Image: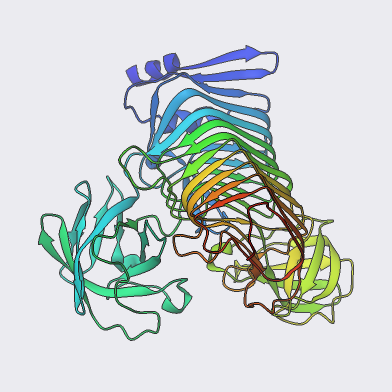
Amino acid sequence: MRRLMNMLFLLSLVLSAEGRTIRFCPNGDTDRTAEVVHALRSVSSGDHVVFERGIYHFHPESAEQLWLYPSNNTGGRKQVVFVFRDLKNIVVDGCGSTFVFYGRAFPFAFLHCQNVKVQNLTVTTRYPWAVSFDVQEKDDKGFRVRLGRETDYRIDPRCNVCFFLGGDSLDSKAGRISMHALDGFLVNYLMTPDAVGNKDEFPARFVGVRATDCGNHEVRFSYYGDAHPKSGELPYRVGQPVVLNLAEKRLSVAFFFDGCKGVKVRHLSVNRFGGMAFVAQRSGDISYRQVRVMPVKGEPVSVTADVFQCINCYGRVTIEQCQVGYSLDDAVNVHGDYLVVTAAYGHKLQLRAMHLQQENFFPYRPGDRLEFTEPHSRRVVGRARVTDLSAGDSTDSYRCTLTVDTLVDGIARGTLVENLSLCPDITLSDNVFTHFPGIRLSGRGRIRYEHNNVSHCMSALEAYDLAEYWYESGRCSDILIQDNHFEDCNAMGGTAFLSFGVSGWGSDAPKIHDRVVLRRNIFIGARQKYLVEGVKSFTNEDVSASGH
């Protein structure tokens, strides 16, 4: 009874002309998940959800159970704290509050909403998802490392290692654990003998080892002689700063927008998170302004995956006046997805998503324009318009069937299918990006990359059509890069500051990108400013540039 009375005092509903204000007040370190989930079930279009300034804690046990499939992440059942479905004109205002999420809690999911605003909020997690991993010594038999003092781990009798994060855990028997060099962004995987998973599908090399606890937070890893072609010795030197990514499977997204239109994120920070910070898919008119994604003081990593990812969006994608750094994957990634034709007959197309993290993601709507492309040559072999979509299959969650307005009997099995209607205009302006692997921008819309300060990365921009492995569509029409300050943007293992190309090709790449223009950019520390392949028209108007 007392708990119920406290909830009534802490939650108030205030009627207004625009809707209700659902207001929460801080209450120490109390878990607020059940209270929030219950309150949000009554939210209507036009309501404001307001948190009085303070610290709020959210645990996964009382979260709403949803099946979600963010592209380029692991789909499935999620424990979601904030759920908004089929709503219009929703505002979530943190008033400067900090939200602390525990374990595998999936913080925010906005599903098929219009005109959403999220503002004045800081998101973090109770425990860091990146573990310090200092190499103490190495030889031809293995290597010894020292883990961070805060790391809670155990090693079992079969030489597997398990990490604990306050009620959650990651065991090397469950699969790969990625290792990231912070001064070079070189990624390898740590594998113990009992680890599961198809090694052929790994995007990087791995180190096959048995673990032995040496005490004092030091662990000896001995090579067990894995004969797989991707197996090798530890590539990191003694003393090199390395972290273990304990969220490599990408089970959570901090802010997920699926099928939304009109999203504004303002004055928001993400200090620590295991996974991607922001994912928008099949959504239109996405705007991020004055967003800060930087690590907690004294920690090496902010988020363990991409910061901003937009997949098959439309309208405009705008990222401006943001400060982003120390992520283990791309600062920005905007692209479409290729699906592959498995059968074509009459007006029917059977398609399959090819990447493991594209399960149940079918980015098509009636009326959307499709383009069919040969996988290697990238030659366009046809176009059609969607009239109907049968999403999913009871036996294969990577397969769908489209009905189109054109006969497709001549479309060959293995042909790539791109949705031309889900290619947004992209603007990155007045941002600071530092210490991250790369920025990837692609698509048929207008791309404007201007007035940004970019430093210490593998690549300040990659505009690539990635038809291999990731199956990310990226044929570009119009890219303008101007008035940016680039410093040490290929010093960490990258090829060039700016790269334009086609996966599976080199200098003889087919000319699939239309126009790239550079103006008034400053390059500092450049060994190679840009790499241009597969571009029809490349114009360099940089005063300081001296070739490529």
251 relative to 9, above or below:
below
Question: What colouring style does the render use?
Answer: rainbow
Judge left or right: residue 210 versus residue 287.
left
**Residue furthest out toward the left:** 215
Estimate the x, y position of residue 535 in percent, counting from the top left: 74, 67
Q: In which quarter of the image is residue 105?
A: top left
Q: In this view, does 254 lie to the left or right of 194?
A: right
Task: Determine the image quadrant of residue 119.
Answer: top right
- Quadrant that contains the C terminus: bottom right
At x 86%, y 67%, the residue is 384
In the picture, residue 63 is in which quadrant?
A: top left
Q: How many labels does the image show?
A: 0
The residue lying at 44 percent from left, 71 percent from top is: 204
Task: Give the vertical position of 105 relative to 329 (above or below).
Answer: above
User: Residue 70 or 42: which is nearer the viewer?
Assistant: 70
Nearest the viewer among 378 and 106 is 378
Residue closest to the far right: 406
Q: Residue 496, relative to residue 340: is it above or below? A: above
**Residue drawn at 35 percent across, 49 percent down:** 129
Quadrant where the N terminus is found in the figure: top left
Q: Nearer the viewer, residue 98 or 162?
A: 98
Q: Can residue 158 be seen in this view?
A: yes
Q: Position of residue 155 (x, y in %)?
A: 18, 63
Instruction: Give how far across and how far down residue 102 sits, in percent.
Output: 36, 41
Provide residue 465's location: percent of width, then percent of height: 67, 67
Is any part of residue 43 visible from this angle? Answer: no
